[in-house]
Amino acid sequence: MNDKCKKEALELLQSKASEIGRLPKKADFQEETARFIRRMLGPWPRALEQAGLKEISPTYMGKKARNRVKRKRRRNQNKA
């Protein structure tokens, strides 16, 4: 992923948030711009988190940790 493009996507989100005074929605952008942001930063909630506009969801972090444990267990089972 190009750092310059990622930075541009972050700036797009941050400037839109300050312009409208709330968390930006995909619908606040032209379809092509929203697609660019999603390509650079991932799913919309993660993009907002990376832009510093939204706190990282504890539910998401818990799910991420559970998935990490599951992957380790599967790897260990495959080795046996």
Image (cartoon, helix red, strand yellow):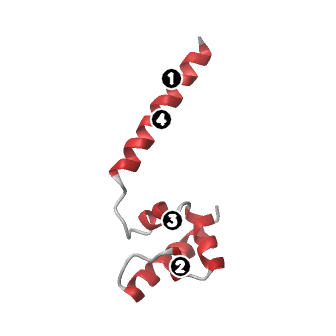
- Mark 4 touches mark 2? (CB < 8 Å): no
The vertical placement of 34 against 72, above or below, is below
Q: Which residue is mark 1?
A: 73
The amino acid beneath tag 3 is: Trp
Does 64 sit left or right of 35 as displayed?
left
Q: CA distance from mark 4 to mark 2?
A: 33 Å
Displayed quadrant of residue 65: top left
Q: CA distance from mark 3 to mark 1?
A: 30 Å
Q: CA distance from mark 4 to mark 1?
A: 9 Å
Question: What element does badge 3 sit on?
Answer: helix
Q: Quadrant of the N terminus?
A: bottom right
Mark 2 Cα shell of 10 Å, populated few (<14), some (14-19), many (≥20): few
Q: Which residue is mark 4?
A: 68
Q: Position of residue 13 (x, y in %)?
A: 48, 76
Mark 1 Cα shell of 10 Å, populated few (<14), some (14-19), many (≥20): few
Q: Nearer the viewer, mark 4 or mark 3?
A: 3
Question: What element does badge 4 sit on?
Answer: helix
Mark 3 Cα shell of 10 Å, populated few (<14), some (14-19), many (≥20): some
* Residue at 59% across, 11% down: 80
Query: Which of the two discs, 4 and 3, labels the residue nearer the N terminus?
Result: 3
Q: Which residue is mark 3?
A: 44
* Residue at 57% across, 68% down: 6
Count of numbered circles on the image:
4
Query: Which of the two discs, 3 and 2, labels the residue nearer the N terminus?
Result: 2
The amino acid beneath tag 1 is: Arg
Q: Which residue is mark 2?
A: 27
The vertical placement of 52 against 12, above or below, is above
Tell me if I can see residue 4 in this picture.
Answer: no
